[in-house]
Amino acid sequence: MPSVAKIRRALLTWYDANARVLAWRARPGERADPYRVWLSEIMLQQTTVPHATPYFLAFTRRWPSVADLAAADDGEVMAAWAGLGYYARARNLLACARRVAADHGGAFPSTVEDLRALPGVGSYTAAAIAAIAFDAPANVVDGNVERVVARLFAVETSLPAAKAELTRLAGTLVTAERPGDWAQAMMDLGATICRPGAPLCTDCPLTDECLAKATGAPETYPRRAAKAARPHRHGAVFRLTHAGAVALVRRPPKGLLGGMLALPTTPWRAAPFSDAEALALAPHAGQWRIAGQVEHVFTHFSLTLAVYAAEAKTREPNFVWTPLAEAQEATPSVFRKALVA
């Protein structure tokens, strides 16, 4: 079995020399800001560091504290989130900020249990905030950590069934010594060295303790069960313009892309729509023409949208008329594609 003492000593020494410089990470010797830790962790769910960083910088410039975010307009926050995806996170972001402002005096609670009770804060995020912002010995396990642990211990159980075992094994490495640094060191190792397809084992501080490396095929860990085929859906989207502005609608608050500004669409279904079926659901009795189609992939399904375009004679009041350039910034990615199709 790998030596916990050797692993911890080697990884923390490596981290002290190689820690990533991230927009939300405190400098050495500084205490992390719980607001910035929380905001970054929510943004990084299903999102890469390079993609999340400009959003994080924009959010913290505009709303530098949790109290500022709690007081923000819902529509402005949703628009600022556009392009990050998984829009339920943005709704939960506001709900959490308002809970912290109203029930906790604008200060994030410090325990995993209290953090876990906040809207949109799951087990991983609560542990990450507790460890990084409050230096609590919490067991922080994200995808990077799962990969590192699966390789260190050569775990043969396939994901997702292995998650409980990987969490337990990760917990054996956590102590009260530098828990915030430990959590970030594990993440950094997974992100930069113990990479999914091509681990840089020659640069890894844990090579001597890694059981997967000893097998000669560390890249085959973690083991993964075969993925089910992603279903495909079809729909139509309507781009109605007038004098340089486009007609948007606010999607219902619940469900996929809930609360976001969007182009009007038909429902999305397994079979393609005929022109007649699509135009029967058009939001305006105009002269519609086919402008193209767009493809988009969500987590659980892929989507083809036929794009219909028309020019309105007037700005009807049942739409949110938005300049085209602003619409590109305010809408989710699937609708950004349809705006330029």
Image (spheres, rainbow, N blue to C red):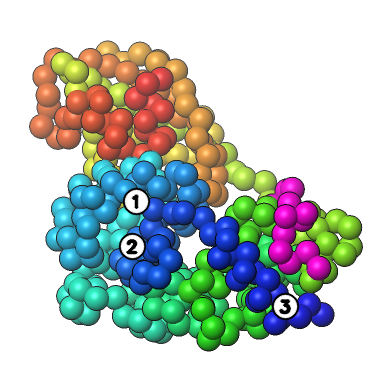
Residue 7 x/y as whole percent: 70, 75
Q: Is residue 296 left or right of residue 251?
A: right
Image spot of residue 124 (x, y percent): 49, 71
Taking depth in this image into account, of 38 and 282 the one nearest to the observer is 38
Q: Is residue 237 above or below residue 100?
A: above
* Residue 256 colored in magenta in the image: no
Which residue is at 50% across, 48% downward?
48
Q: Earlier in the sequence, mark 1 or mark 2?
A: 2
Residue 179, position as x, y percentages in the image: 51, 78
Q: Do the residues under discs 1 and 2 have CB atoms within 8 angstroms?
A: yes
Which SS class for mark 3? helix
* Near-viewer residue (279 or 268): 268
Q: Nearer the viewer, residue 193 or 169?
A: 193
Residue 205 sits inside the magenta stretch: yes
* Above or below: residue 305 compared with residue 110: above
N-terminal of the pair, mark 3 or mark 1, is 3
Query: Given the image, on which type of amino acid does mark 1 rest?
Result: Phe
**Could you give the CA–CA distance between mark 3 and mark 1, rounded to whole angstroms?**
36 Å
Q: What is the secondary structure assignment of the residue under circle 2?
A: helix
Say above or below: 189 vs 139. Answer: above
Report crowding for label 3: few under 14, some 14 to 19, many 20 or more residues within 10 A (C-alpha).
Answer: few
In the image, what residue occupies the spot 55% across and 73% down? 182
Mark 1 residue element? helix
Provide the residue designation for mark 2: 36
| CA neighbours of label 1 inside 10 A, class few (<14), some (14 to 19), many (20+) | many
Please tell me whether mark 2 or mark 3 is closer to you in this view.
3
Indicate which disc residue 56 carries. Answer: 1
The residue at 63%/64% (across/down) is 14
